[in-house]
Amino acid sequence: MTWQRRLIHAASRVHAYQNYSLRFNNPPPAFETTSTMSVTLVLPQGYTYVLASAVSILPLLTWQTYRVGKARAASGIKYPQLYAEKAEAEASKEALLFNCMQRAHQNTVELLPIILLGTLVTGLSHPYIAASLCTTFVISRAIYTIEYAAGNPSRRNARGGAFGIYSAGMLMMTATWTVGRMLFAELSS
C-alpha cells in the first residue's frame, strides 16, 4: 500500500475530526508541473482556533512596534542604534523607557519561533490546548510589555507577564510529544 493510500485510509477512519480537504489537481499556471499530484490535508476539528491564536500575534507585534517607534522618537535615539547607551539611559528617562520598550519587543520576537512552531505542531493533536497556550502567550506578552515599558524592568513579570514563558515551555513539551507520537505511529506501521 502506498503512503498516499495509507493516508487516505487513515483519514477515512478518523471520526472525531472534521475533514478539510485541499486538493491541488489543477494548479495555477505558475506552478504547473509535468505530472498531476493530489494532496489531502486532514486537520483536526478546532484547528481554526489554532490558526486564529497564531494570527493574534500580529496585532501584538504591530502594537509593540508602534510603541518602540514612539519611544525612539521621544528619546531621540537615531537609527541604526538598537539601544540607548548606558550613559544615555542614566541621563534621560526617555532613553531608559526606549530601552525597556525595545527590550520587551525584542524578547517577544525571540520567542516567536518557539510559540509559532509549537502552536502549529501541537494543534495537530490537541488544537484547543495549542490555541489556549498561544492565546495565553499573547495576553501575557501584552501585560509584560506594559509593565516593562513603564521603566522598571524588575516589574516586567509582576502581573502575569511570566505566563508567556510558561506557555512557551508547555508548547515545547506538547509539540515534542505530538511529533514523538507521530514518529512512533509511522515507525510502527
Image: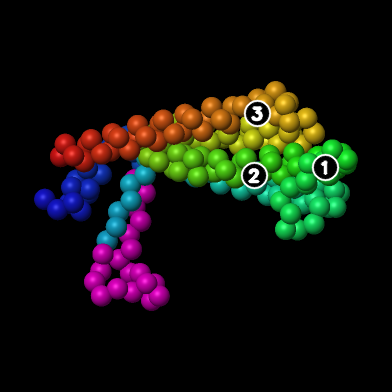
- The reply to whether the C-beta atoms of the residues labelled 3 and 1 are less than 8 Å apart is no
The Cα atoms of the two marked residues, 3 and 1, are separated by 28 Å
Q: Which residue is mark 1?
A: 87
Numbered range of the magenta stretch = 19-37
- Relative image position of residue 34 (x, y in whole percent): 25, 75
Q: Which mark is residue 106?
A: 2
Image: 2 above or below 138: below
Q: Quadrant of residue 106?
A: top right
Please name the amino acid that badge 3 sits on.
Gly
Q: Does 30 lie within the magenta span? A: yes
Magenta stretch mostly in which secondary structure?
loop
- Relative image position of residue 35 (x, y in whole percent): 24, 71
The Cα atoms of the two marked residues, 3 and 2, are separated by 15 Å
Rendered residue at 35%/69% (across/down): 27
The nearer-to-camera label among 3 and 1 is 1
Image: 148 above or below 40: above
Please name the amino acid that badge 2 sits on.
Gln
- The color scheme shown is rainbow
Q: Which residue is mark 3?
A: 161
Q: Secondary structure at mark 2?
A: helix
